[in-house]
Amino acid sequence: MDGSSQMKNFLKLVRSILGRGVLSASNEETKLRSIDAEYLPGEILEGLEHFEPYGFGSRAVKGSEVLSVFFNGDRSHGVVLVTADRRYRLRLEEGEVAVFDDQGQKIHLKRDGILVSTPKNLTAAVGGNFDATVTGTSKIKTQALTIDSPDTTVTGNLTVQKLITGTGGMTISGGDGASVDGSLTTTGDVTAGNISLQNHTHTGVQPGSGNTGQPQ
């Protein structure tokens, strides 16, 4: 075999070792995710193992691109190293990192902070949901915290170590009521058991300059 033929065979081998294709299906039931993809026109390879870094996982959607390696150029024995999808890629600044999907959900480590976003079109009524389950304790340490929500529910006890300031009033119902260790000041009326503290009257009191006794 002359040098020209050897070079041709070498280049053919190199082209056979690496393959770039389009994902047609994936299977999560195997220990390693398996992928079917089309490489050359009409060349559909099935059951290719998808290798991922430990602790990280992503299942690409149909139409994503795959980069595979075939050992010794054997197209019947290959693994998928990388999946990518240019249709949903985020535009990032230098140094930024992001986790995202095809629905527009993302965790974006921006240059000025962290952005977590779920778009409204995930469900017709509410939008994307965020659920976090922590079996231990959680702590948020920040200069200021704003919760922008029309309704907030706390299912357990709530302890506030400093001042509570409210502008919309306060309603307490059921349970053992509220306990305040310290003073309680309000610029509006206080109603308990349908009795107004500001406008209620006492019966059986004689007119005069004296004062009533303290509440018992």
Image: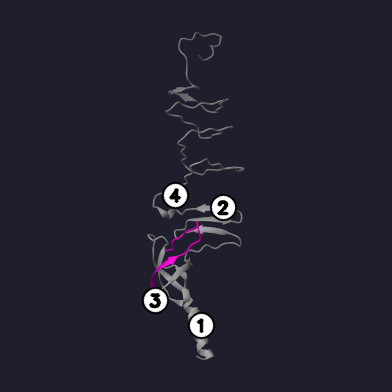
Q: Residue at x 54, y 14 (%)?
A: 214
Q: Residue 181: name its quadrant.
A: top right
The label nearer to you, 1 versus 2, is 1
Q: CA distance from mark 2 to mark 3?
A: 43 Å
The magenta-colored residue range is 43-62
Residue 137 pos. (x, y %): 52, 40
Instruction: Relative to 38, say whether 11 is above or below.
Output: below
Q: Is residue 97 left or right of residue 122?
A: right
- Give me the residue at 49% from left, 84% from top: 9
Disc 4 versus disc 1: nearer the observer: 1
Label for residue 114? 2
Distance (Cα) linking label 4 and label 1? 51 Å
- Evaluate if marks 2 and 3 touch, with contact meaning CB atoms under 8 Å apart: no
- Vertical placement of residue 193 versus 214, above or below: below
Which element carries disc 2, helix, strand or loop? strand
What residue is shown with label 4? 129
Other-residue count near label 1 (Cα within 10 Å), few / some / many at <14 / 14–19 / ≥20: few
Residue pointed to by mark 1: 11
Q: Nearer the viewer, mark 2 or mark 3?
A: 3
Would you name the residue on which mark 3 appears? 43
Residue 57 forms part of the magenta stretch: yes
Alpha carbons under labels 4 and 2: distance apart = 18 Å
Q: Residue 201 versus residue 35: which sits nearer the camera?
A: 35
Residue 178 location (% of width, % of height)? 49, 27
Mark 3 / mark 4, whichever is N-terminal: 3
Three-letter amino acid code at the position of disc 4 = Asn
> Of tags 3 and 4, which is closer to the observer?
3
Identify the residue at horizontal 54%, vertical 58% (top origin): 98
- Is residue 18 among what the camera can see? no
